[in-house]
Image: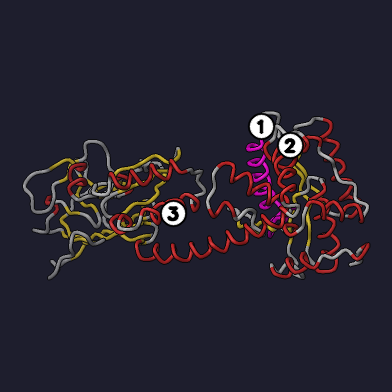
Amino acid sequence: MRQKSGYKMQRIVAFLEKYKIFNSGKTFLVGFSGGFDSMCLLDILFKLSSEHNFKLIAVHLNHNWRANESDKEEKNCEKFCNERNIQFYSEKLSDDVKKTETAAREARQEFFRNCSKKFHADGVFLAHNKSDNTETVLYRIAYGTGVRGLGGISEYTDCFGYKIYRPLLFWTRDEVEEYCKINNLSPNNDSSNYNTKYKRNFLRHRVVKDLKQINPDIDNAVMRLSDIARSEQNIIKEYLDNIRAEISSKENIKTQNFLSLSLDVKKKLVHELFIEKDLEYDSKKIEDVLSFIQENHDSAAGKTLSITDNLWLFVCKKYFTFIKKEEKIHDEILINNEGVYVFGDKIFEIKKIKNIPEKFPSETEKQAYANLSFPLYLRTRRDGDIFNPFGMKGSMKLKKYFINKNIEKHMRDKIVLLCNEREVLWIPEIGLSEKIRVAKTPLYHISMKER
């Protein structure tokens, strides 16, 4: 690839080689606003793609903020792509979308996610540069950030359904503009970029400008800070992963083990949990979660704390975890004879046997022997359910039985029950009713397994 004025791009070539983009035959999207950064990136990738066998699709989101100006910029992007035979795709945001930085960012993320699915793309190239990283770090500092926040913009991100690559992160904005000038590119010049009512613009035109009076090389200084922060974060993650392995079982964290940790480690673990779930957080939310765990660490049945509309933190004596709101299954399956029956993600089998076994399973197993009379039903619990525990003379409310057995509240609606018309007869892995005690024939073997 020929470069005017010997313009060097070794860092970009090394980046693409590092992530095995060259000669991959894969398809990649390029976020293309038509501004200096994205036009510079698309031009470079286009020239490299023809030599190194990977496909590009330029995708443009018209935010519809500046009416005719936004439409003109979209047409300029399309013209640029048509002249180079680059596939171009665009969408225009509805007037109903709020014209805020947050709404715009969320709309772009959704746009890239949808485009990735639409074109079966293997990744998205975005044109963030070193100067953007400076603004990002300063923005986070202004709101109070930790080590993770100082890490700034990552060169690669797996962003919940699509991969993001940022090859220009090692270039300053001045270097990007120089490339556009040398290569005779005519980028869009978004007038809103100069409006300091937007926080990013305020940082760019006011704060960073003043900081350059102290250190003209501020972009590289902040990038070094980000590199150090990411290194520190990697060390912290390695330490926390070892702790998580010791105090966790699957996605559950053992409550008592967690509480034995130092306060700083507990805070950091909760912080990481919020990040893993892609939840908004601040110091108050982390403190609230820690307090809730402490207050309910001895609860047998467990307590829940609302985190979002459909996500809760569940805490009991044994463990704590995040749980999602799930719709209760209201189906009911009628059983008139022996056979195999599927209910949700469970498979039940009822089989008649001739002889009483020498040894009976414990109540906590997924099988039992019982005297049954049809019809029977498979369903989840209902208000007013009763159950006669094995070995007891009388019946009790199923709710009380679950409490006595320390069955966590959020698990109760997921349990599939074998019932007759009046009461619960078998609760797999939990309990068997006295009403179906083996004493006579007909005798049945009942079992449950996962689908």
| Alpha carbons under labels 1 and 2: distance apart | 9 Å
Q: Position of residue 254 (x, y in %)?
A: 32, 57
Q: Which residues are magenta?
A: 101-128
Dot 1: within a 10 Å radius of its alpha carbon, few (fewer than 14), some, or many (20 or more) residues? Answer: few
- Asked where in the image residue 360 lies, by quadrant, the reply is bottom left
- Asked where in the image residue 48 lies, by quadrant, the reply is bottom right
Specify whether residue 4 is in view. yes
| Residue tagged 2 | 63
Given the image, on which type of amino acid does mark 1 rest?
Val
Given the image, on which type of amino acid does mark 2 rest?
His
| Name of the residue lying farthest toward the front | 214
Q: Residue at x 45, y 43 (%)?
A: 283
Mark 1, secondary structure of its residue: loop
Counting residues from the start of the chain, the first of labels 1 and 2 encountered is 2
Left or right: 258 as drawn, with respect to 207? left
Mark 2, secondary structure of its residue: loop
Answer above or below: position of 12 versus 65. below
| Residue tagged 3 | 268
